[in-house]
Image: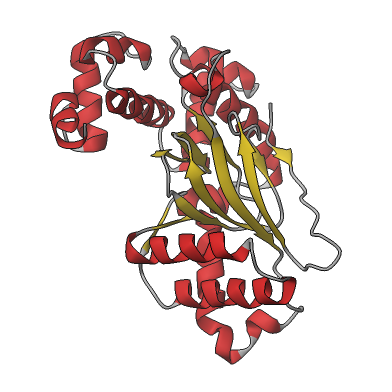
Amino acid sequence: MKPILEKLTPEPECSFVLQKDSFPYYPTPWHYHPEYELVLVLKSSGKKIIGDHISNFKDGDLVLMGPNLPHVYDNDPAYYEKDSQLKAEAIVIHFSDNFLGNTFFNLPEMAKVRQLLNASRQGLQITGRQRKEIAKRMEKMLELSPPQRLTELLNILIGLSQTEAYSCLASPGFVQNYGNANAKRLDPVLAYLMQHFAEDISLEEVASIANMSPQSFCRFFKHCTRKTFLTFLNELRIGYACRLIGDNRYSISEICYKSGFNNLSNFNRQFKRVMHKTPSEYKKAYV
């Protein structure tokens, strides 16, 4: 249940990994790797968890993640149905810190790129016009020769370093406190929550997964994530509720219970706290 170490190997003539994936749904579980990752969702929707950040994704979603940041892209339930004809497609780039040499990113000319890569340790959501431009470049890269791909990746990183069209995802507290010792206790808890968030979950149940008392677990969880356990769980549920509202197949009351809430008033209160709109207002604005 802890995040698995994923290793993608570059082709013999390449210094980094560039690949286009196409699956019925994204198969990779909660995982991490020592490489940076730039991932463009071409087709599909669902929720992504990057460190302690939870949000929905859809076509065009673009994120740059730093080394060893646990993450997962979990498709909507419709993608897992037996007769589903849906496709989950993405372009993924993996590159190591020294793929251009041990000192390349320490050159004076690369100072802003170095800052960008440091910031990506929290995960960066790329937005605005920059997102569209990089998406086009990534699709074009698939048709280029290995030397041209290398030049294009460097141009992408330089372009990103010269804009502020991105936002940090995982909290600084998560990144700072996510060490080997804490990971052994936190990872199975996060994996369990991702699978069972819509069910009735007790604090005692989750604390037992970490082999801690409920009181100790609450302090530990907030130390690692900078969020209380209940806040994290509610945000996970609200993210799923937003996706169900977007599907436009269920009533607000149905979505409340499908998301793991026990009563409608608490659901409305928590939804407004996270999304700054009531579920009905959110539906009118985005559906």
Residue at coordinates 19% horizontally, 24% vertically from top-left? 269
Instruction: Residue 46 in the image: state x and y as whole percent.
Output: 45, 32
Nearer-the-camera pick, 153 or 229: 153
The answer to whether 75 is drawn above or below residue 140 in the figure is: above
Nearer-the-camera pick, 165 or 170: 165
The answer to whether 275 is drawn above or below residue 39 in the figure is: above
Instruction: Residue 212 in the image: state x and y as whole percent.
Output: 61, 22
Instruction: Residue 178 in the image: state x and y as whole percent.
Output: 60, 46
Q: Is residue 186 left or right of residue 60?
A: right
For the N terminus, give its image quadrant. Answer: top right
The answer to whether 199 is drawn above or below residue 134 in the figure is: above
Direction bottom: furthest residue: 108
Q: Quadrant of residue 128?
A: bottom left
Residue at coordinates 33% horizontally, 65% vertically from top-left? 129
Q: Quadrant of residue 189?
A: top right
- Residue 244 seen in the figure: yes
Nearer-the-camera pick, 7 or 287: 287
Nearer-the-camera pick, 269 or 139: 139
Residue at coordinates 33% horizontally, 22% vertically from top-left? 244
For the C terminus, give its image quadrant. Answer: top left
The answer to whether 255 is drawn above or below residue 143 in the figure is: above
Q: Is residue 262 left or right of residue 12?
A: left
Number of numbered markers: 0
Residue at coordinates 18% horizontally, 38% vertically from top-left? 276
